[in-house]
Each structure stands twice: as structure tokens, then as C-alpha cells.
Amino acid sequence: MKLEGGKISSSHLTFLMIGFMIGSSLIFIPGQTAGHDAWLAILAGLAEGLVFAVIYTTLAMRFAGKTLVQFNDIVYGPYLGKAISIAYLWYFFHLASLVLRSFGDFFTAIIFPETPMIVFIVLTALICATAVRNGLEVITRCGLILVVTMSLAVLTTTILLFKDMKLTNFLPVFDIPLKDFIKASHSAATFPFGETVAFLMVICFLENVKFAKSSAIKALIITGLLLVMASVRSIGVLGVTAPIHTYPSFQAVRLINIGNILTRLEIIVVGNLLAMGFLKISVLYYGTVLGTAQLLKLRSYLPLVLPIGAMLVSFSILQFDSVIENIFFTFEIYPYYVIPFQIGLPLLSLIIAIVRGLPKD
Amino acid sequence: MIALLIIAFIGIALFEIPDLIQRKRWRELLVFLVFLLFAFIVSLLQVLEIKLPNPVKGIEFLVKYLLSVVG
């Protein structure tokens, strides 16, 4: 019994991956802890992220047509495999609730200060639930349109900010201790590049799995360039004050002023966040729901969508008391917390699969 | 707030259950009810402002402990 009838093409996968990785990183700049060298940290993180992507796609191509939950059973046996799958489902669930929470924090802090956060979280979760109920094809088609619009918006805002940028803000280049730089670039690799591990639930629906590797690498490089552009924009405009702001991208775009006519364009950043965050939550939500359905051997994943959505909403409210806790978790704890999910287990699975010659036909 | 919560969960139940019964998908129905009940209890406790254990605090503690061991 097949749970998902849809098929996606490799270019759709590329766009979906770009949207997924841009996700919430348009407001939290990855590698932010490196100060004005954040763009270097992103580039170093991209290199690390490419290694991850090669591991994931090699796994996905080896076990063609099988999702993470299915091939965990083959690699680790039925019992240990189930335990590892549950750990992964927890990770996807937690990541989705983190992104939802970032949404809520952003909207209550910046745009609608009087509205309770739960309103935004519930509404976003409802939209994502609709997308997940409609299946993977719907999410990927949304991705195509939204990602093209988003890239144009990032490009436009960067061009409009050229006149406010000071190149001296980037000097002195590489003026941080090596240890801090490695920490910042690892943080950039795990958020957002390594999060593509969630695509192990999606790549198996690719029409031609041979193109998985090239489309993933393309997606990572494009995302890296867009993020470098966004961080150059923020650092160039805001300079040393960039790390002070909770949301540097938003603050930078707010400063656009072309002859007092083109002003207050920051809503573009909000729109981008809304669109990309929707893609990210949908993919993670879809992965959680599909994985749970496969784990429990259900015939359809649809009945799980709304209960898991309700859990997502309640957990995203529960987990942090304030936006500061969220940022602390994202930059200080998250890079270490995800090491087993993003590097350890995929690498171990790949080694076991190669040594034991899996999958045996 | 509690009334809103109950209405929302009854809404979810009414949305899914008839179709599942009609197709005789008992396994799916059971899983659906277990998940929904869990979600309902957790959110009810949150609405009643009863402190729930926060897994994120546990993760933070674990990561800090491991980092201090590694050095």
C-alpha cells in the first residue's frame, strides 16, 4: 500500500530545497555569532553542508524508493531501526515547532504587538496542515512559485540598499579567533544546510532518483549564495550594530529610502519569511506525519495530520518563554543537539549499508 | 479559552471520524484517537496553566553537560 501517490521532478526538488533552507534563516542570519564575518562563516558552513548533502543523497539513491523510516528498518533491524526512526520523527517534529515558534515570536515582536502569539501559530499551522493533507505535489508546486518570488525580492532589496552599504564595515576581514569561527560556521552548517536531512523523507518520491545528488548540490549552492547576499546586505548596512538587533535583515531593509518615495519595504522581508517558513514547516510536518504513518503501518497518513498539528501548536508554545530563549537555543544549543541526527546517524547508516552490501535484492 | 479549545478538538474529531468509520479503517481510527487525546490533554493542561515538563530544558542540560565533559 502506497501512502503517497505523487511524484516530483528534480527541478521541483531543487526549488523546494532552496525554500526549505531559506526558511527561517532569512530573519536569523546563520553564523550570526561571527559578527561581521558572518558571510565567511556561511561560506565555510556551505562547504560542510555540501558534505552532509552528499551523504544524504548517496543514502537516498542507495535505498531508492524508500523513506528514512523504511530504510532504518533494513539497516538497523526492526527494533533498533524503529527506535532510531522515532528519534528522527521527534527531531522533525521539534524542528517544525521551532520554526512555528520563530514565526510567532517575529510577528508578535515586530508587526502585531497586541495580538497573542497563539493566533499566528494556529493560523500558520492550519495553512501547513492544508498543504500536507493535499500531498507532496502541492507543496512542491507552491515551492516553485514562492522561491522565484523570494529570490527576486532578496535581489531587489539588496540592490536598493547598495547606496547605504559601507564596505569598511567588513574590515578587518577574518578578525575573530579560529575557535569562534569554527563554531559559527558549524552553526551555519547545521542551520540551515544540515536540516536537509528531512528530505530523506521526500527524495524517494523523485521521478528519477539519479538526479537527486545534482539537484541537492545545486540547491545548497544557490541557498548559500542567497544567504551570503542577505548577510552582506545586513552587515554592510548595519555594521557593528547588526548583532544587536534581534532581526538584522528586517532592520536593514527597514532603512531603504529612495527619495522618500520607496520606503518601508520591510514588509517584503515579512512576506518572504511567511512564504519560506510555510515551505519549511510543511516539509517537516509532512515528514513527521508520513513517517509516523509508516512506523505504525497505517494505510493513509491523512488522519494523523490534524492531531500532530495540534501537538505542534501546543509544543511550540510550551518550549520557550521568550524570544531570547529561542535565539539562545538556536545559536548555542542547536548546533550540538543536531549532530547525531544530521551527521552521526546518516554516516553510520551509510557505512553499515556499504559494509553489509545493503540493500540486498 | 477552554471552551474554544474543546470546540476546536471536537471540530477536528468530527472532521475525520465519519470518513474513517465509513471506510472501516479501525487501526487508523485508533491511532487518530490516541494522538488526538494526547494533544488534547497537553493543550488543556497548558490552558489551565499547569507547568508541564519542557523537553527543551532537558536537551539544553544534556548538551551543556556533554560539552563540559568534552572540554
Image (cartoon, helix red, strand yellow):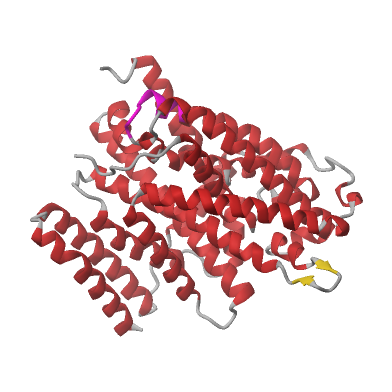
Residue B43 x/y as whole percent: 34, 71
Tell me if I can see residue B57 in this picture: no
Nearest the eye: A206 or A141: A141
Q: Quarter of the image holding residue A133? A: bottom left
Nearest the eye: A103 or A246: A103
Residue A249 x/y as whole percent: 71, 59
Q: Quadrant of the N terminus of chain A?
A: top left
In the image, A209: left or right of A242?
A: left
Q: Quadrant of the C terminus of chain A?
A: top left
Numbered range of the magenta stretch: A57-66
In the image, A298: left or right of B57?
A: left
Tell me if I can see residue A361 in this picture: yes
Residue A326 x/y as whole percent: 57, 61
**Residue displayed at 88% across by 58% down:** A163
A60 falls in the magenta region: yes
**Residue at far right of view:** A168
Residue A95 x/y as whole percent: 47, 53
